């Protein structure tokens, strides 16, 4: 199967050419949708949406465009249940009944046109706009966000259209991932998942911001201390890098995570990790500060990939990183060296994620003369 980058790139190409794309959910049991780019809408592409979809054609627009066109929220809409913030429905002025494929395609094209004005649309109508989250799929995993994100990365205006893909096996249901993939293959259209779009954006964009950078002396020589905060997960990290870079040495990157906000007895795992990096001769210890637990493993993994890239590593040994390394490899745009090649004294025997408490974290900070990472 193609990797996420390949699938997203094909989807971008299809949208740019005015063809539909099948979008599967974040999980196999989630509803599938059909997407098109609003500015490329044609009678043929809208007819495809209507024929194989629910009949309801939705337009995906950023909040700023909804505000500019005075598209008010739909009264009584249950956003928590729908996971989409719908506005009042509209038609482009000068259309016929507004319900034909030609009329709805024209409405979509006008929604994508930055020169369109409030008076260019009548209310109610036959196209249902959806206001997307500011951060796209990184804020909300929804078809509207995916439609706008894919149009944006394809170089098109930030507007899309989507409809739920009706199951051909049971037309009272919406197709799930397996059937949606078969549908895409049968109709020779591109298929992409919500998580593909998330992974692509995390790979191609920067969402981890540097908060501070200092150099401290330690028993292992100079250590570069860099604080980070992720715009996506909200998690804070501190990376401690030994600055020597021996020729031919593969960097070792260790991941540790606070699990208890109160000081407690510790076996000194932080010191052990720095010692392992020093023994390896080159590398970094990344500490994730304690968070509220809402950050997903996928988001933390992507955060770590950005930090590893920021350290300048392309093929590091990884120790105690979250499971499922293949997506991390894609984020790194490179490869991950086989950890078996690391000396036994460097590898954690269990391979389990080390849980770092505040006492151990304070021990590490004290050893290098640093202070707690504070955010504004």
Image (spheres, rainbow, N blue to C red):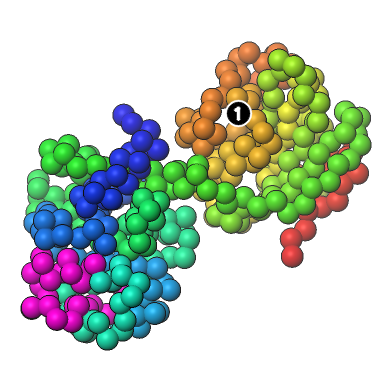
Find residue 41 and report its horizontal and vertical position in percent: 20, 60
Find residue 297 and report its horizontal and vertical position in percent: 52, 43
Residue at the (30%, 67%) spot, across then down: 112
122 displayed left or right of 74: left
Find residue 47 and report its horizontal and vertical position in percent: 10, 58
Mark 1 Cα shell of 10 Å, populated few (<14), some (14-19), many (≥20): some
256 displayed left or right of 246: left
17 displayed left or right of 270: left
Depth order, front residue of 108/263: 108
Magenta-highlighted residues = 82-109
Residue at the (86%, 51%) spot, across then down: 371
* Residue 337 drawn above or below residue 310: above
Is residue 33 visible in this depiction of the protein? no
Find residue 32 and report its horizontal and vertical position in percent: 24, 51
Mark 1 residue element: loop
The image quadrant of residue 276 is top right
* Residue that carries the numbered disc 1 in the rendered image: 314
Find out whether residue 103 is within the magenta segment: yes
Residue at the (50%, 44%) spot, across then down: 204
Find out whether residue 100 is within the magenta segment: yes
Residue at the (35%, 83%) spot, across then down: 70
* Residue 47 drawn above or below residue 225: below
């Amino acid at each position: 199967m193609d990797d996420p980058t390949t699938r997203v790139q094909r989807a971008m190409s299809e949208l740019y050419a005015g063809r539909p794309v099948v979008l599967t959910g974040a999980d196999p049991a989630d509803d599938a949708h059909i997407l098109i780019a609003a500015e490329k809408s044609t009678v043929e592409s809208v007819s495809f949406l209507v024929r194989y979809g629910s009949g309801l054609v939705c337009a995906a627009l950023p909040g700023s465009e909804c505000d500019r066109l005075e598209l008010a929220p739909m009264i009584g809409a249950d956003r928590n249940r729908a996971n989409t913030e719908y506005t009042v429905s509209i038609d482009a002025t000068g259309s016929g009944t507004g319900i034909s494929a030609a009329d709805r395609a024209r409405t979509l094209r006008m929604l994508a046109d930055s020169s369109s004005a409030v008076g260019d649309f009548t209310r109610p109508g036959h196209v249902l706009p959806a206001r997307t989250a500011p951060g796209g799929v990184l804020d909300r995993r929804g078809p509207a966000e995916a439609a706008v994100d894919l149009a944006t990365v394809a170089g098109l205006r930030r507007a899309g259209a989507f409809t739920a893909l009706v199951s051909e096996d049971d037309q009272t249901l919406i197709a799930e991932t397996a059937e949606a993939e078969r549908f895409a293959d049968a109709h020779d259209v591109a298929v992409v998942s919500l998580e593909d779009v998330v992974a692509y954006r995390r790979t191609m964009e920067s969402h981890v911001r540097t908060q501070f950078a200092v150099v401290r002396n330690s028993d292992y020589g100079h250590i570069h201390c860099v604080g980070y905060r992720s715009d996506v997960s909200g998690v804070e990290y501190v990376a401690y890098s030994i600055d020597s870079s021996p020729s031919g040495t593969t960097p070792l990157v260790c991941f540790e995570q606070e699990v208890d906000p109160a000081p407690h007895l510790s076996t000194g795992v932080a010191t052990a990790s720095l010692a392992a990096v020093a023994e390896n001769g080159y590398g970094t210890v990344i500490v994730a500060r304690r968070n509220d637990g809402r950050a997903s493993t996928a988001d933390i993994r992507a955060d770590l990939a950005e930090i590893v890239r920021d350290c300048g590593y392309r093929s590091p040994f990884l120790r105690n990183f979250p499971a499922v390394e293949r997506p991390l490899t894609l984020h790194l745009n490179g490869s991950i060296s086989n950890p078996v090649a690391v000396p036994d004294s460097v590898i954690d025997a269990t391979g389990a994620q080390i849980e770092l408490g505040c006492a151990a974290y304070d021990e590490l900070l004290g050893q290098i003369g640093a202070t707690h990472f504070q955010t504004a």
